[in-house]
C-alpha cells in the first residue's frame, strides 16, 4: 500500500520530466524559429524573460542590448518571439500598411483591454480611435491651448515662489496631470494648487508601475492580492492601483453629471464620449469608459514630463546650448509679458531642435511593442518569419543608433537644424495605425513648457547628475533609478 502511494506521484513526476525534456528539445531543434540565434534558455521557456522583468526588476531592455551584442541584429528572445535591432525593420513592423496585430499576452497586463491603447482587434481599435481622434486633432488642441498655457503659467508661478529646490519629477507631472484631467473630465485635478508639488495620486501611479510585469507573467496575482498581508510589496502596489481607479471613477461620474465644466474648456472627452460610444458601438459600458480613462491619464501625464526632465537637465548642463535657446526665445518673444502661441513657437528653429533632441533621449515607450505576424508570414531584409511569431523592436535601439545619430548619447540639438532626415527616426510616439493618439497634445505641451520656462525663469540644477536622468529600468516607460531632477528657480526680470 505504501509502495502504491509513492508510485503514482513518482510516475507523475517522471512523465512531467519526460514531457519537459521533449518540449525543450522540440523548441530547440524542431521549432520554426530554431535557426534564429539566441540563448537556449530563452528558446526553451518564457521564464527567461520573467527573470529579467520580474525577479531582477525592469532589466529586460539591458539584457536585450547584451543579447544583440552577442548574437547580432536579430535574436530569438522567447520560444516564439524575435527581437530586432536593425532600424530598417521598424517600418515593416509598425508602418501604416503593416498587417501585424498587437500581442494579446503582452497588452493584457495593462488591464485596459477595451481602450484604444489596449484593443487587440484592429477593427475595434479603429472604432475606438475614431471616437477620440476629434478631441486630439490639431484644431482641437489649438482651441485647448489656453488651458495648457494656464497650467504651465501656474507651474511657473509656483516654481518661482518656492524657497527650496523643487523636485521636478513631480512638479512636471502635476502640470501634465492637471492638463489631461481637464481635457478628459472638464475640471483640473488641482495638483498644482496642492500644498506640495507632490500629489498622492502621482505617488500611487509610480508605486503601481512594477505591478505591470508581475501581472504580465503571473496574472493570477490580481485575484489573491486583496488577501495578501500588507508587508508584501505586491499588496501595496495593488492598493495604489485601486486608489488610481477610485480617482478615475470619481472623475467619470463628475463629468457625466456636470452641465457646465468647472473651467473654460471648449469641450471635454467624458461629457461626450458615453453618448458617442452608444452611437458607434451600440453601447457605452462602464468598463470601456474606465479603461479609456486609465490609459489616457497614464499616457497623458508621463511621456511629456519625462521629456521635460531630460531636456531641461541637458540644456541647463550645457551653457552654450542654454544661451542659444534663451537668445532665440528672446528674439522671437521680446516682451515676455505678452503671450506667443504654439503656432509661433513652432517657427523657432532651435526650440524645435531642443524639443526633438529631448524626445530622442527620453525615448517615450522603451519596451519593445510586440506584434504578431499574420497569415502568410513576414519577409523582410532576408528574414522569413513564420505566421504566429511575436516580433518587436525597442525604439531605444533606433534613438541611440550611431549610424542614424552620431555620438548618440550626447545631447546635440544642432543635429536637427537644417535636416529633416532624422525626423523619420524620431519614434517617441511610435508609428503606423496604432501610434500615440495624443501626439498633437504632446507637441503643444512641449513647446509651451520649454518656451515659457526658459523664457521666463532662471533655473539652476541642484544635486542631480547626468546619471540620474539617463539610467532607467524598463517598465514599458523608463523608470529612472537615480535621484529626481531638482532645480532652484527664480523669475527673470522682464
Image: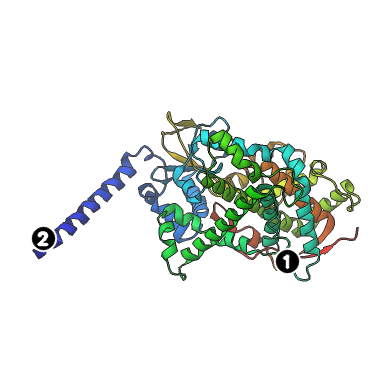
For image coordinates 79% across by 46% down, the residue present is 350
Residue situated in front as seen by the camera: 208 or 470: 208
- State yes or no: discs 2 and 1 in contact (Cβ < 8 Å): no
For image coordinates 72% across by 36% down, the residue present is 420
Above or below, 201 relative to 282: below
Q: Residue 50, image x and y in percent?
A: 43, 55
Screen quadrant of the C terminus: bottom right
Question: In which image quadrant can residue 493 be found?
Answer: bottom right
- Disc 2 versus disc 1: distance between alpha carbons? 70 Å
Residue situated in front as seen by the camera: 202 or 4: 202
SS state under label 2? helix
Dot label at residue 166: 1
Residue situated in front as seen by the camera: 423 or 116: 116
SS state under label 1? strand
Q: Residue 179, image x and y in percent?
A: 70, 51
The answer to whether one can see residue 322 in this image is no
Q: Residues within 10 Å of mark 1 (few under 14, many from 20)?
A: many
Q: Residue 172, image x and y in percent?
A: 70, 58
Screen quadrant of the N terminus: bottom left
Q: Residue 279, image x and y in percent?
A: 58, 34
Dot label at residue 4: 2
Question: In which image quadrant can residue 345 be found?
Answer: top right
For image coordinates 39% across by 53% down, the residue present is 47
Please give left or right for residue 419 compared with residue 233 in the image.
Answer: right
The answer to whether one can see residue 96 in this image is yes
Amino acid at each position: 500500500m505504501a509502495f502504491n502511494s509513492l508510485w503514482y506521484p513518482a510516475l507523475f513526476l517522471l512523465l512531467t520530466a519526460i514531457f519537459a525534456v521533449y518540449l525543450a528539445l522540440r523548441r530547440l531543434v524542431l521549432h520554426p524559429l530554431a535557426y534564429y540565434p539566441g540563448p537556449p534558455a530563452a528558446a526553451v521557456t518564457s521564464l527567461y524573460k520573467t527573470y529579467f522583468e520580474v525577479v531582477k526588476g525592469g532589466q529586460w531592455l539591458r539584457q536585450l542590448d547584451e543579447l544583440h551584442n552577442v548574437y547580432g541584429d536579430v535574436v530569438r528572445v522567447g520560444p516564439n518571439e524575435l527581437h530586432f535591432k536593425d532600424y530598417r525593420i521598424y517600418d515593416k513592423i509598425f508602418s501604416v500598411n503593416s498587417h501585424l496585430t498587437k500581442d494579446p499576452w503582452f497588452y493584457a497586463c495593462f488591464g485596459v483591454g477595451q481602450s484604444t491603447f489596449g484593443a487587440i482587434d484592429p477593427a475595434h481599435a479603429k472604432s475606438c480611435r475614431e471616437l477620440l481622434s476629434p478631441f486630439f486633432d490639431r484644431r482641437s488642441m489649438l482651441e485647448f491651448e489656453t488651458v495648457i498655457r494656464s497650467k504651465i503659467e501656474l507651474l511657473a508661478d509656483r516654481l518661482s515662489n518656492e524657497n527650496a529646490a523643487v523636485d521636478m519629477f513631480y512638479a512636471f507631472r502635476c502640470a501634465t496631470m492637471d492638463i489631461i484631467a481637464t481635457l478628459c473630465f472638464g475640471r483640473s485635478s488641482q495638483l498644482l494648487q496642492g500644498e506640495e508639488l507632490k500629489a498622492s495620486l502621482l505617488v500611487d501611479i509610480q508605486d503601481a508601475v512594477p505591478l505591470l510585469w508581475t501581472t504580465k507573467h503571473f496574472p493570477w496575482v490580481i485575484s489573491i492580492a486583496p488577501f495578501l498581508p500588507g508587508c508584501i510589496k505586491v499588496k501595496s502596489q495593488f492598493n495604489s492601483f485601486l486608489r488610481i481607479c477610485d480617482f478615475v471613477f470619481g472623475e467619470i461620474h463628475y463629468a457625466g453629471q456636470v452641465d457646465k465644466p468647472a473651467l473654460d474648456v471648449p469641450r471635454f472627452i467624458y461629457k461626450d464620449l458615453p453618448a458617442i460610444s452608444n452611437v458607434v458601438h451600440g453601447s457605452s459600458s462602464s468598463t470601456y469608459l474606465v479603461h479609456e480613462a486609465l490609459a489616457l491619464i497614464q499616457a497623458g501625464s508621463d511621456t511629456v514630463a519625462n521629456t521635460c526632465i531630460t531636456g531641461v537637465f541637458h540644456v541647463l548642463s550645457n551653457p552654450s546650448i542654454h544661451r542659444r535657446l534663451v537668445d532665440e526665445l528672446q528674439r522671437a518673444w521680446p516682451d515676455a509679458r505678452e503671450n506667443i502661441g504654439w503656432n509661433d513657437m513652432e517657427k523657432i528653429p532651435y526650440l524645435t531642435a531642443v524639443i526633438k533632441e529631448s524626445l530622442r533621449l527620453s525615448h517615450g515607450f522603451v519596451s519593445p511593442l510586440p506584434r504578431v505576424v499574420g497569415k502568410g508570414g513576414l519577409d523582410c531584409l532576408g528574414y522569413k518569419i513564420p505566421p504566429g511569431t511575436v516580433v518587436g523592436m525597442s525604439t531605444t535601439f533606433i534613438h541611440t543608433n550611431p549610424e542614424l545619430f552620431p555620438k548618440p548619447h550626447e545631447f546635440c540639438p544642432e543635429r536637427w537644424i537644417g535636416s529633416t532626415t532624422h525626423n523619420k527616426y524620431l519614434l517617441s510616439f511610435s508609428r503606423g495605425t496604432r501610434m500615440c493618439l495624443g501626439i498633437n497634445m504632446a507637441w503643444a505641451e512641449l513647446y509651451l513648457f520649454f518656451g515659457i520656462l526658459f523664457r521666463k525663469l532662471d533655473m539652476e540644477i541642484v544635486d542631480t547628475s547626468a546619471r540620474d536622468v539617463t539610467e532607467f529600468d524598463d517598465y514599458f516607460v523608463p523608470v529612472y533609478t537615480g535621484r529626481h531632477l531638482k532645480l532652484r528657480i527664480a523669475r527673470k526680470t522682464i
